[in-house]
Image (cartoon, rainbow, N blue to C red):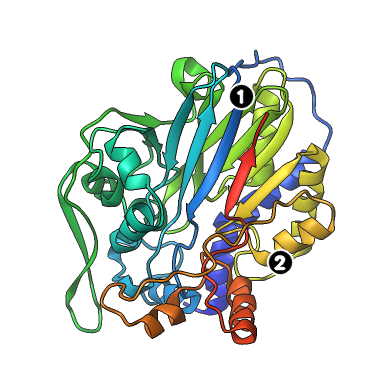
Amino acid sequence: MKRRTFLKSIAATGAAASVGSAANFMLPRKAHAKKKVDIGEIKSVRIDVLSETSWFNNDILKKNMMDYGGAMTNQYTVPWDNDNSGGYSALITVTTLEGNERKILMDSGWSNDWMDYIFEEKNDIANMLKKGEIETFVLSHWHLDHTWGIESTLKHKQDITMYAPKTYYPEDMALLKEKAHHKAKDKDTGEMKHICKNDHPHTGKLTLCEPAGEKGEGIYRLMPGVAARMFDVPILLRVRGENVLYFNVKDKGIVTVTGCCHPGILSLFSYARKNFKDYQPYGCYGGLHISLFETWEPKFDDIIKGVKAFKIQKLGCNHCTGWIWAEKAAAAGVPVVKGTDKYKEYKKNIYRGQSQQRLSDQRRPCGLLSAAMRRLNRREKEHDTPVSFLFFTIYMIHR
């Protein structure tokens, strides 16, 4: 597959979906007769980035895809370079109106090695799961960098309550519910190569989300003030459907939390405006899936205009957003939240049997952000410091 074809397939299922909502958003709309949903209120929500580095080298990932059919191939048929895998995950802490804290884990990354490191050594997620402090797991979508590290979650709490898109494939459900060890054939050597596994099948309640939601409301109520919405949209690598979370913070408004925002950021905002009672936008967190490979098109300016029109107070974007879009959005007046550089450097001598030098070479943010790679490479040369994560590391909204 040629590079141009590859990029076109990316755009067709990613940024293009976002832009479609941008164009529609700017047009006047008639009042909607549908009864709006009251999802309740919470006192506050805090989102901690656990890992938004899905892989460590864009070129390796793109070569893996292009060698095995391109961006629309079946992700389970690609013998991915396991040393290039990381993962996406976030911890969400809700404070209820009564003052109680309740925790939600969104996504479990790709590599079990990487996510074990993140959950057990860099954070206290493993202990939180064992103690039952994290009561709910929400899978945003079935992409490998959000799903394949599920063992790192389930080995600490197999019976955790889980929400996942109903648009799964047999391989997805086998990984979740069976002791699955998936392999893919290397076309050059003929070798069946390990790509993912889970030796701790999920035993708890699983809600498979679809657009109709519960009771035809279009949402799933996780707790008062917190709702999940499944958007059935086509995505890369034969995946479709994404769960998005909405939090209604008292005296503030709606906070939207997304894994990759495949439906488009303005579609997520527009859905809340159209369907939630007393809608007031406040914030958004997650990967926004816009300028993935540092390309820029005029329609991306429309997304910035659309986001500004919603007058949100905080935007914490990372993962697959694109540095160029985040920088242009901030320059245009979008309230982009800067990070803390909490994970600026990892001090770990051995990772998957590799030396510290090899670790430093790989441990750079990539997700889908080639621009970020280039910028951080320059920063490493200038400051002689390995930089690991993107700039949005902690995002908080308090009453």
Q: Residue at x 61, y 15 (%)?
A: 38
SS for dot 1: loop
> Is 215 left, or right, of 337 in this rendering?
left
SS for dot 2: helix
Q: Residue 258 appears at what percent x and percent y?
A: 55, 44
> Amino acid type of disc 1?
Lys
Quarter of the image for the C terminus: give it.
top right
Please tell me whether residue 219 is drawn above or below residue 68 in the rendered image: above
Question: How many residues crowd mark 2 within 10 Å: few (<14), some (14–19), many (20+)?
Answer: many
For residue 192, what is the image quadrant?
bottom left
For residue 73, what is the image quadrant?
bottom left
In the image, 271 versus 83, the foreground residue is 83
Mark 2 — residue?
A: 324
Q: Residue at x 68, y 70 (%)?
A: 295
Residue 359 visible in the shown view = yes
Question: How many residues crowd mark 1 within 10 Å: few (<14), some (14–19), many (20+)?
Answer: many
Q: Residue 174 appears at what percent x and percent y?
A: 21, 46
Q: Residue 249 appears at what percent x and percent y?
A: 64, 26
Q: Which mark is residue 43?
A: 1
Confirm or deny contact between disc 2 and disc 1 (CB under 8 A): no
Q: Residue 1 appears at what percent x and percent y?
A: 46, 77
In the image, 102 versus 32, the foreground residue is 102
Please tell me whether residue 161 is drawn above or below residue 3 in the rendered image: above
Q: Say whether disc 2 or disc 1 marks the residue closer to the N-terminus.
A: 1
In the image, 236 versus 104, the foreground residue is 104
